[in-house]
Amino acid sequence: MALITQDFIVRSGLVVQGTADVSTSTNNSGALQVNSGAGIAGSLVVGSTASIYGPTILNNTLQANGAATFAGAGTGLTVSNNALVSGLFTVTNASTFNQVTIGGLLTANGASLFNNSVFVTGTNILTVGTGAVNFGGTLGVAGVTSITNSTTAATGELVLW
């Protein structure tokens, strides 16, 4: 192995031909190993899997042209600013969202639990399919109420004025 103790400048390209894949960031042979920082002014193209051992900061856009998986211990994926999802967004396990704005249709294929108030603003309509609606408290209606079938009062009295 040659030890170079001065700046080493390559003006026409450098090809390192190793004999084995790299599995850690230190003590490799047959591959390019940088024991300090590396600055890359142009594009970086990796022909196979890229493994990064340590925190990673991207100072610009992250574009994933295939599936993206965020796994491991801890919080998984944390977004501290706006997130835009242009296609299908699927959550398969319990998740917590502090504030979500949905510009289109929200579909919940399972039971949904809301632990706070739910507001339908504007002239929009809240529609329930053929199932029943149960209210645990008082139902207040500010506008005209239309009932197209029979009404049953289980307890108390029905007051009409």
Image: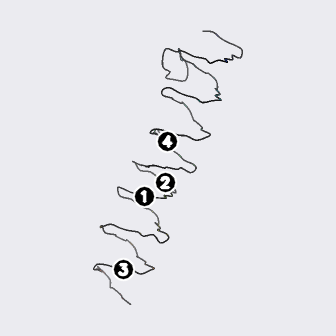
- Residue with the mark numbered 2: 97
Which of labels 4 and 1 is toward the front?
1
Residue under the image location 55 percent in, 28 percent down: 45
Residue 64 picture location, percent across and down: 50, 39
Which of labels 3 and 4 is toward the front?
3
Q: For mark 2, does the 10 Å Cα neighbourhood hold few (<14), some (14 to 19), or many (20 or more) residues?
A: few
Point out which mark residue 74 bears: 4
* Of the image marks 2 and 4, the number of the one nearer the N terminus: 4
Horizontal arrangement in the rendering, residue 53 relative to residue 137 (left or right): right
Q: Are marks 2 and 1 in contact (CB under 8 Å)?
A: no
* Of the image marks 2 and 1, the number of the one nearer the N terminus: 2
Q: Amino acid at mark 1?
A: Leu
Q: CA distance from mark 3 to mark 4?
A: 51 Å
Q: Are marks 3 and 2 in contact (CB under 8 Å)?
A: no
Which of labels 2 and 4 is toward the front?
2
Q: For mark 1, does the 10 Å Cα neighbourhood hold few (<14), some (14 to 19), or many (20 or more) residues?
A: few
Residue under the image location 44 percent in, 80 percent down: 143
Q: Amino acid at mark 4?
A: Gly
Which of labels 3 and 2 is toward the front?
3
* Of the image marks 3 and 2, the number of the one nearer the N terminus: 2
- Residue with the mark numbered 3: 146
Label 1: state its secondary structure: loop
Q: CA distance from mark 2 to mark 1?
A: 14 Å
